[in-house]
Image (cartoon, helix red, strand yellow):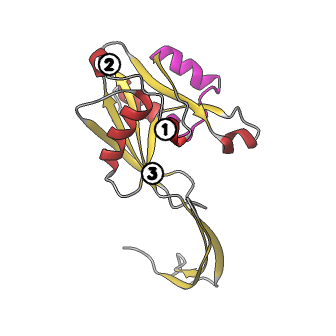
Amino acid sequence: MGRRVEIIDRKREYDGFFKLERVTLRYERFDGRLSEPISRLLFERGNSAAVLLYDQAADSVVLVKQFRYPAYVNDGPGWLWEIVAGMCEEEEAEVVAQNELLEEAGYRVERLEHIMSFYLSPGACSERVELYLGHVTGRSKVSAGGGLPEHGEDILVRQFGWQDVRRMLGEGEIRDAKTIIALQYLALRKAGQP
């Protein structure tokens, strides 16, 4: 059973590509009483879909690399290895996933296997990620990929053997959370765990 949340006030602080909202609320505590009013900022980015491309015969995964300004300014490399992903605006997550596979990586898959839904940063952001596994073969690559230049995208596409990906994880070369979650899922699956 869900607990009660009382919204006292809501104000849009920024309304652009992303949205920022200031909310004053009270929530039901575990003892059943309502909390004192608290103020929170909510970063609304929209939901997204992400796909780990896996070639079982080659025991390899496809990753993409692109520049991420927020990772750059926070003492990071800026260019991150990631799984394919995109924002779900008006479309269903699976449709977004298929479109992004083609645009970013140049792959087409017949069927996406839903892995899980999760929140990346629930303390500040409402984004929910729908994570999929896409099985590929050599015939799944239908174009170069690389993103859409009109969207400012410049995406590198690479296929890595599973042992190389494990090394990259261990050495901290992969720092994107959705990618780490997807690769951990695949590692558990390969080990015979659900």
Quarter of the C terminus within the rendering: top left
Q: Dot 2, crowdedness within 10 Å: few (<14), some or many (≥20)? A: few
Estimate the x, y position of residue 115 in percent, counting from the top left. Answer: 35, 41
Q: Earlier in the sequence, mark 2 or mark 1?
A: 2
Q: Which residues are magenta?
A: 161-179
Most prominent secondary structure in the magenta stretch? helix
Q: Secondary structure at mark 2?
A: loop
The residue lying toward the viewer, choosing from 96 and 43, is 96
Residue that badge 3 annotates: 118
- Tell me if label 3 and label 1 are in contact, CB under 8 Å: yes
Q: Earlier in the sequence, mark 3 or mark 1?
A: 3
Residue that badge 1 annotates: 181
Q: Dot 3, crowdedness within 10 Å: few (<14), some or many (≥20)? A: few
Location of residue 112 (image quadrant): top left
Does residue 14 appear left or right of residue 149 in this picture? right
- The CA span between labels 3 and 2 is 25 Å
- The CA span between labels 2 and 1 is 18 Å
- Per the image, is 169 magenta? yes
- Per the image, is 68 magenta? no
Q: Earlier in the sequence, mark 3 or mark 2?
A: 2
Query: What's the residue at 57%, 82% (across, down)?
Result: 26
Residue that badge 2 annotates: 56
Does residue 110 appear left or right of residue 33 in this picture? left
Query: What's the residue at 48%, 38% (across, down)?
Result: 181
